[in-house]
Amino acid sequence: MPNVVFFSFKEQDRGVVLTIKGRAVNPRYSALNFRVQDLLKRWQTENESVIKQAISKSITGTSRTIVFVGADTWKSYWVPHEVQMTLDRGKPVYAIRLNGVQGSTPSCLTKNGIKVHSWSEANLQALATM
């Protein structure tokens, strides 16, 4: 059974991440083979406690979190929360750049010694299954 991975990303990168998720869960697309748990559903609330609860629920049952680093991920309010929630559960966090994007590394990754890997589907598959 494939690993279940939580995807962490900045909202502006939603479309690219949805495409990646679609490939990962498509049994006919053999380059990526893992399951995804995420918050790709848009929330109609700004209530922080409701959102944190949804993140916590989504991270439960996953084996790891992968942060997708885009141009402005370093500005994200939620990515640091998702990273910390994952680490608090004793699960690993990995990071990978979105294809062709060289945004700054979020401080939550730097302070936790999390390396940002360059984009390739092979790298993503390795991070999702190592």
Image (cartoon, grey):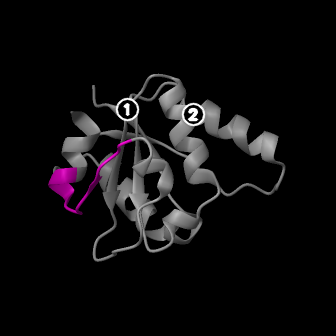
SS at circle 2: helix
The quarter in which the C terminus is drawn is top left
Does 62 sit above or below residue 23? above
In the picture of the structure, the residue carrying the numbered disc 2 is: 85
- Going from N to C along the chain, the mark reached first, 1 or 2, is 2
* Residue 99 x %, y %: 28, 71
12, 81: nearer the viewer: 81
* Residue 107 x %, y %: 49, 55
Does 57 sit above or below residue 97? above
When asked about the image quadrant of residue 98, the answer is: bottom left
Around disc 1, counting alpha carbons within 10 Å, would you say few (fewer than 14), some (14 to 19), or many (20 or more)? Answer: some
What residue is drawn where x is 24% and y is 63%? 119
Q: Label 1 vs label 2: CA separation? A: 11 Å
The reply to whether the magenta stretch includes residue 87 is: no
Does 6 sit above or below residue 78? above
The reply to whether the magenta stretch includes residue 121 is: yes
* Residue 111 x %, y %: 45, 46
* Residue 32 in view, yes or no: no
Task: Left or right? Give the position of 59 relative to 34.
Answer: right
SS at circle 1: loop
What residue is drawn where x is 65% and y is 57%? 77
| Amino acid carrying mark 2 in the image | Met
In the picture of the structure, the residue carrying the numbered disc 1 is: 92
The quarter in which the N terminus is drawn is top left
Marker count (numbered): 2
6, 78: nearer the viewer: 78
What residue is drawn where x is 35% and y is 43%? 113
| Amino acid carrying mark 1 in the image | Pro
In the image, which residues are magenta? 113-123
